Amino acid sequence: MQSHSKKELVYLLAGSALFLSVVEILIPKPVPFMRLGLANISIILGIYLLGFSYTFLLVLFKTLVQGVLSGTILSFAFGLSISGSLASFFVMYLLYRFFKERLSLVAISCAGAFFSNLAQLTLSYLFIFGKASFVFAPLLFLSGFVASIVIGVFSVKVINYLES
């Protein structure tokens, strides 16, 4: 892999996250607030290439820009989004940091999706919809699981390409 500064990689991954967020906005959703999480490819690559602090900034940037682009920055949906993004990031980072020899990036991506959905459902239950939040839980977890596998596989392919 060609040597780049961490700052350059943050810019590249932020641009990629932005692009993937715009692509995702264009994809029809069965439920209005449900997202595939394509921009999480950039987060997984950040965890692998950059470490904690730069990737944390990348997560904040991704979430804020997604909120602006989707028009949810001042809504409850943004609160759900940032809680899910932070939960996902912390879980994925810790799993990668301590278990990277035993867990694949696909498994780490799946764990991130699970905890993102769990955080969002918990906040939705506590502050917005109550028990009605659980109506969407099976669809949310299933779609998150499938999307996280695709995101994890794609991330591994990018990393393999970069290392070849």
Image (cartoon, rainbow, N blue to C red):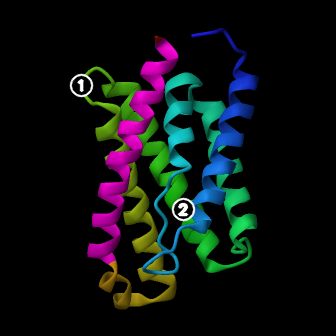
Residue 159 vs 58, above or below: the answer is: above
C-alpha gap between disc 2 and disc 1: 27 Å
Q: Nearer the viewer, mark 2 or mark 1?
A: 1
Residue 17 x/y as whole percent: 63, 46
Amino acid type, mark 1: Arg
The magenta stretch spans residue 141: yes
Residue 145 x/y as whole percent: 30, 56
Residue 96 vs 73, above or below: the answer is: above
Marking on residue 122: none
The residue lying toward the viewer, choosing from 119 and 72, is 72
The stretch in magenta equals 137-163
Disc 2 on helix, strand or loop?
Answer: helix
Q: Circle 1 sits on which residue?
A: 102
Q: Would residue 153 be seen by someone viewing this image from the given angle? A: yes
Amino acid type, mark 2: Ser
Q: Circle 2 sits on which residue?
A: 83
